[in-house]
Amino acid sequence: MELKCWVFVGVMLMVIVGSKGSEEEEVTYDGRSLIIGGQRKLLFSGSIHYPRSTPEMWPSLIAKAKDGGLDVIQTYVFWSLHEPQPGQYDFSGRYDLVKFIKEVQTQGLYVCLRIGPYIESEWSYGGFPFWLHDIPDISYRTDNEPFKFYMQNFTTKIVNLMKSEGLYASQGGPIILSQIENEYQNVEAAFRDKGRSYVRWAASMAVGLQTGVPWVMCKQYDAPDPVINTCNGMKCGETFAGPNSPNKPAMWTENWTSFFQVFGGKPYIRHADEIAFHVSLFIANNNGCYVNYYMYHGGTNFGRTGTSYVTTSYYDLAPLDEYGLIRQPKWGHLKELHMVIKACSKTLLEGKKSIVPLGELQTAYVFQEPSEGCVAFLINNDTQHSANIEFRNNSYQLPPKSISILPDCLNATFNTAKILTESGERNARPELVLSSATRWEVFNELIPNFSDTSLKADALLEHMNVTKDESDYLWYSLRFETDSSCSEPVLHVRSLAHIAYAFVNGTYAAGGAHGSRDVKNFTLDTPIKIDTGMNEISILSVMAGLPDSGPYLERKFAGLREVSVRCNGNDIYDLTANHTWGYKVGFLGEDLQIYKQENLGKVVWGGFELSAPKAFTWYKATFDAPSGDDPVALDLSAMGKGEAWINGQSIGRYWVSLLTPQGKPSQTLYHIPRSFLKASENLLVLFEEIGGNPRQISVNTISWTTSKSSNNVDYTPNDIKYLMTPEGIHT
């Protein structure tokens, strides 16, 4: 009863929201659209995540989004970055959310702030800081008091920060929408009654913060009033059942412009014509008033921020590529669509809609105002054949699977399948190949054994609970004794981590056994040499990002589950139970942060030996920045797996050795933001797990040129054209 009462009050008081300028304006909504300052709005939005780029890139990204016809910039808020420890907050550098929003405001756009604070977003641990895991009796994303306390605390922190800076539209700021939770419908059933009560609590908590803007819940069909339920996906014009109240507008918070890519997986290419078709269909069929492109600019998963197996390059096939460059024809085709829709938005938002059959697979959606305003969408759903149709005594030819837009119900000014924008081709120009052996120095990590470990346990401990996300790496070590009867020994390991490497008596036995994004359980079986008597086994468990989704995230298990030595094909030394294991987190170089200039002297670096590349080796070199303003990327195609730093800042994980089914690396070029570079003597440090050959690494500049090829081509990261340099061609 109390909940219903305050919800009613929330609706009555609902949202005095301002414009993107400095004047306070009321924003409400009804079953047709958002209403800002008394005017209905049909809004195009794009997701740009501030920590996946740099403050120096933000103005250009936002300007290109605006030029592309966007009205709104949408971003998540990244809890794990902003509160790395309970009560300790960081809003500096790439994490400066306020600066990012003020830049959006400066350029005259609105903001949709998706606070979450669970975000998924292919972000490690779904955006949760790992310290949440250690809160007693906690269960994430359900009606659980410890979780609700910390969730409300962080949400309140963000809301108060926005209020203190005057960033809500009710204060004259740009924020016109906020989101609480994220795609909760995917997991709600797992929590049963506690899931349903949690949804009601989350809505109540959010609206009770009195942000002065509407709240949304994406993919949440039962979003409580006054929270708006919205659609995520690629085909919301076909799949969205609509708002759960006739008083709520139809909104699309994630229109996926491609899809995230994983190491070992090929990119998903979504062409410009398909995106334009489904945007047009959503507006026509669902009376859609808000469409957000996820992502409009994907960017880079710097450091260890990417979730399990996800590449460092994020949504590179978006309208703005990883480097912030315009990707054609996607950007230009969508810009043309936005211009056409906006020119007739008044009729679309206020006209009466009728549906006119034109054929078995052809339909017209007509919006007619009482006056002369009239807009028609002529739809051909036949995926194979063009259609010649008659509409209002005029003939129109519709290409297969296309929509023609008639802003005056007469002249077809845009067709989703007819792309007039020229395609582009992305070029990587090698400016410098780091080929000189004298340029490189190395530091080889030692393999720890049982006596080197301080943490001991009579069980195989869970990986994430030991590392606390301080490192990707966890060593499992033990001593065991065999007799002379053990012949043809084979080490068997079953793991729920991502990779396993094995050492026996300090000698590398085997490595690189791994799972995948879809296969969570993998085994390593390798012949080994053991001595009669005492033996040392050290197994390195590796995570390439923490999981980001699913119910009961706090209960996820990673790391070793079974270890045994099989002798003579039959006899088994079961090392899983009844043995004492030692544990060590990470490597010495990580602990000492030797990727930073001031810490280089904490270890002894040696010369480079091409003939003997070793696993778990640190490489360092220096280079001068390429001239000009073009984006810069590091070509790591000759390396295996590891992480790279430039002047102490991580540009992310690389995993070149994990190939796609077509036998190609998922990613070879790794973005170095210009702001990470100095004019000269830039420090490059790599931590390589497998070996690799750093003498084939090159520093590249990236650019786009107009292509004469098909106008509907979207180039993938592996389609980059390499240009000739004075030092020769590098592919």
Image: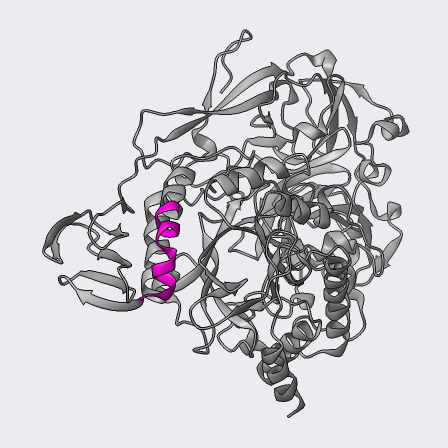
Pinpoint residue 10: horizontal percent, then vertical percent: 63, 79
Note whether residue 574 is visible: yes
Quarter of the image where one finds residue 390: bottom left
Pinpoint residue 137: horizontal percent, then vertical percent: 77, 75
Pinpoint residue 424: horizontal percent, then vertical percent: 40, 29
Along the line of sight, the residue nearer the viewer: 601 or 201: 201
In the image, residue 545 sits, relative to residue 37, either above or below, namely above
Along the line of sight, the residue nearer the viewer: 313 or 516: 313
Quarter holding the N terminus is bottom right
| Residue furthest top in the image | 726
In the image, residue 389 sits, relative to residue 323, either above or below, namely below
Residue at coordinates 52% horizontally, 32% vertically from top-left?
A: 325
| Residue furthest front in the image | 371
What colouring style does the render use? one colour
Residue at coordinates 32% horizontally, 37% vertically from top-left?
A: 712
Note whether residue 316 is visible: no
| Residue furthest bottom in the image | 1
Query: Would residue 721 appear left or right of 95 to someone viewing this image?
Result: left
Residue 343 falls inside the magenta stretch: yes
Query: Would residue 444 appear left or right of 640 to someone viewing this image?
Result: right
In the image, residue 674 sits, relative to residue 185, either above or below, namely above
Name the dominant secondary structure of the magenta segment.
helix
Residue 669 falls inside the magenta stretch: no
In the image, residue 503 sits, relative to residue 355, either above or below, namely above
What span is in magenta?
339-351
